[in-house]
Each structure stands twice: as structure tokens, then as C-alpha cells.
Image (spheres, rainbow, N blue to C red):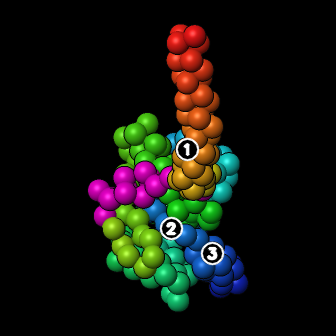
């Protein structure tokens, strides 16, 4: 079915805007996946702030011009779904990796981060990145450790003095 020029321009503008604000993109071949499964994937994607786009390759190539995802141009072959991570760079990778485990027909083609195209075998690099919440938790633990150690050390000084005074007292009581 032919798409009108105005519709094509709107699609290109929408994908360009999404790509401009995205942190990473994962490309996958969705042939053989049922529409019900795709609907479930879209629902999961919305919950994780991942934007899924199925766009004709020519329009996608035009849309990614001028963005850091120009590198995916060569990977846009055949039916492709684009998953853009908007807040967490690893969100789309985790989502599509889990979906590909469940559905054999779903095949990850590649991914791009920071203007670099990586193969599908590199999906774990991105999928294993901690979420924002996990990263902040790790940072808090690292910054809290020296303070905790200092507090324990300072708390230990009065304890040692108390034990020393108690030992002297016990000695004097035994001598008397």
C-alpha cells in the first residue's frame, strides 16, 4: 500500500525526533512473530520507556541522518524493528534479548550506542548495564563506605578506653 508524501514526512520526523533523544537503539528482524506477541512486546516496551518503531528501511535511513545512529544505515536490510532506549541505555537491549529467548523467530540484528554499530553478539554488553536505579545504589554504597568506616573507627576509641579502665579497675580489685 502506497504511503502519501505527507505521511512519509511525518514518519521521518517522528523517527528522527525519537532517535535524537535516544541513548541507544537495537535492531531486530521480527519475521515469524505473531501480532499478539508483538502487542505484548509493545506493552512491555512502554512500561520500560523503550520506543519501538517499524518503519520502511528507506524512511528509516532518511530519519536517522544527522543523529548518532547514522551508523545503523548498513544494518537496515529486510523487515526491521527499531527499539530506542530513552532513559536507560540498556533497557531496549534487555527487552529484546528476553523477547528473543522466548521467540525463536525473533532475531536481533545489531545495536548502536554512541555512534558505534555493534553486532548482535554484543547485546550482552548493553543488556548487562545497570539501570539508573541500580547505578545510583552502587554509587551510594561506594560513597557511604568510607564514612561508615570512619564512624566505626571513631566509635572504637571510647570502647578501647573503657576496656582499658575496666582492666585497670579489675587489677586493682584483685590486688586489694
Determine which quarter of the picture holds residue 72: bottom left
Residue name at image x 57 percent, y 38 percent: 156
> Which labelled disc corresponds to residue 153?
1
* Frontmost residue, 157 versus 115: 157
Rendered location of residue 109, percent (x, y): 36, 60
Q: Which residue is denoted by mark 2 in the rendering? A: 24
Looking at the image, is mark 2 or mark 1 earlier in the sequence?
A: 2
Residue 116 visible in the shown view:
yes
Rendered location of residue 146, percent (x, y): 54, 53
Determine which quarter of the picture holds residue 16: bottom right
Position of the C terminus, as image quadrant, is top right
Q: Does the magenta stretch include residue 20?
A: no
Residue name at image x 57 percent, y 49 percent: 150
The secondary element bearing badge 2 is classed as: strand
Q: Read off the magenta span.
A: 119-132
Examine the residues drawn in magenta and state their main secondary structure: helix
Amino acid at each position: 500500500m502506497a504511503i502519501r508524501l505527507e505521511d512519509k514526512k511525518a514518519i521521518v520526523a517522528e523517527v528522527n525526533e525519537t532517535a535524537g533523544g535516544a541513548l541507544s537503539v537495537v535492531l531486530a528482524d521480527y519475521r515469524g512473530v505473531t501480532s499478539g506477541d508483538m502487542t505484548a512486546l509493545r506493552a512491555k516496551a512502554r512500561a520500560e520507556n523503550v520506543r519501538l518503531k517499524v518503519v520502511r528501511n528507506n524512511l528509516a535511513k532518511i530519519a536517522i541522518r544527522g543523529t548518532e545512529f547514522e551508523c545503523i544505515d548498513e544494518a537496515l536490510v529486510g523487515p526491521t524493528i527499531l527499539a530506542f532506549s530513552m532513559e536507560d541505555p540498556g533497557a531496549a537491549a534487555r527487552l529484546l534479548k528476553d523477547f528473543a529467548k522466548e521467540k525463536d523467530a525473533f532475531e536481533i540484528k545489531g545495536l548502536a550506542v554512541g555512534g558505534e554499530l555493534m553486532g548482535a553478539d554484543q547485546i550482552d554488553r548493553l543488556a548487562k548495564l545497570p539501570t539508573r536505579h541500580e547505578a545510583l545504589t552502587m554509587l551510594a554504597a561506594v560513597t557511604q563506605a568510607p564514612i561508615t568506616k570512619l564512624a566505626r573507627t571513631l566509635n572504637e576509641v571510647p570502647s578501647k578506653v573503657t576496656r582499658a579502665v575496666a582492666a585497670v579497675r579489675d587489677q586493682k580489685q584483685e590486688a586489694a
